[in-house]
Amino acid sequence: MKILVLLRGWRRTPDGALDVERIGHFERLALGAALGLRDERSDDVTVQTLAAGNEADDEALAVTHALGIEKTSRVWDPILQDIDALGVAQALAAAAQHEGFDLLLTGFHSPDHQLGFMGPAVAECLSIPHLTGALQLHWKDDGLEAVRSCDLGQFTHQLKTPCLVTVAGGPDPGTAKPTESHQPKLLTLDDIGLDETRLRPRVRLQGEMLSDSRDPYVTAFVDDAATVVEHLREVDALQKGLRPLGP
């Protein structure tokens, strides 16, 4: 049984500096789930980590190595810095297929975008089932048992591999100083059998933030109801792209 954990390092700290030594909270939980499953059946379970990105992810992968994961891989091509999330999911899916897996684990969402998109997108690219937001993962008979919660309470799911699970709870393996000598296995698009032309349609449209010509918000206290009503009418009209209407 091979567990492949998809992860990435933090892109920014609150002061804007790069900090790739830290792994996001949910990525750590995915690692904790993988290591827990390995400990339950240490005789036939291996764990590997995989990232899609440039060398900024190497130290994040080196952290996982310091936590006890021997094999790490990273797929990279310059086009990956220009494509959208679905393109990255295609690259991760192709790399996962190349490396081989029985179970894919990801964090519930990434530390910066927090959209929860990547896991389901990779599963869709691989045409495998997926479960999001697992709080617990355990072996049960010949498959996996996952516990997740929703508004109605907690549910237990029986999973068969291959599948993908996004992890939202469970043991946290913590952080460790990156293994300085560790270098992940580097994969190219050719290695994983992904033609760059398949990613070209995923290149993001580049834009530039223009200055905001709107007046800044000013807090004011009024006791005239008619003034408040008129202001709300003007705001509603502006939001709809219309001129304010008369009374």
Image (cartoon, rainbow, N blue to C red):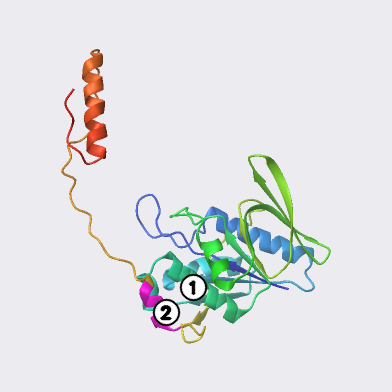
Amino acid marked by disc 2: Arg
- Position of residue 172 in the picture relative to residue 144 (left or right): left
Residue 128 lies in magenta, yes or no?
A: no
- Is 137 placed above or below 72 here? above
> In x, y percent, where is residue 234?
21, 30
By secondary structure, the bulk of the magenta-drawn segment is best described as: helix
Q: Position of residue 64 (x, y in %)?
A: 58, 66
Q: Counting other residues with Cα less than 10 Å from the Cα at mark 2, is it few (<14), some (14-19), or many (20 or more)?
A: few
Q: Quadrant of the N terminus?
A: bottom right
Res 182 visible:
no
Q: List the residue tagged with mark 1.
A: 90
> Which amino acid type is marked by label 1?
Gln
The stretch of residues the image draws in magenta is 195-201
Q: Quadrant of the C terminus?
A: top left
Nearest to N terminus: mark 2 or mark 1 = 1
Q: Nearer the viewer, residue 87 or 174?
A: 87
The disc placed on residue 198 is 2
Element type where label 2 sits in the image: helix
Q: Residue at x 67, y 63 (%)?
A: 34
Task: Locate residue 196 relative to residue 5 in the image: left or right.
Answer: left
Labelled pair 2, 1 in contact (Cβ < 8 Å): yes
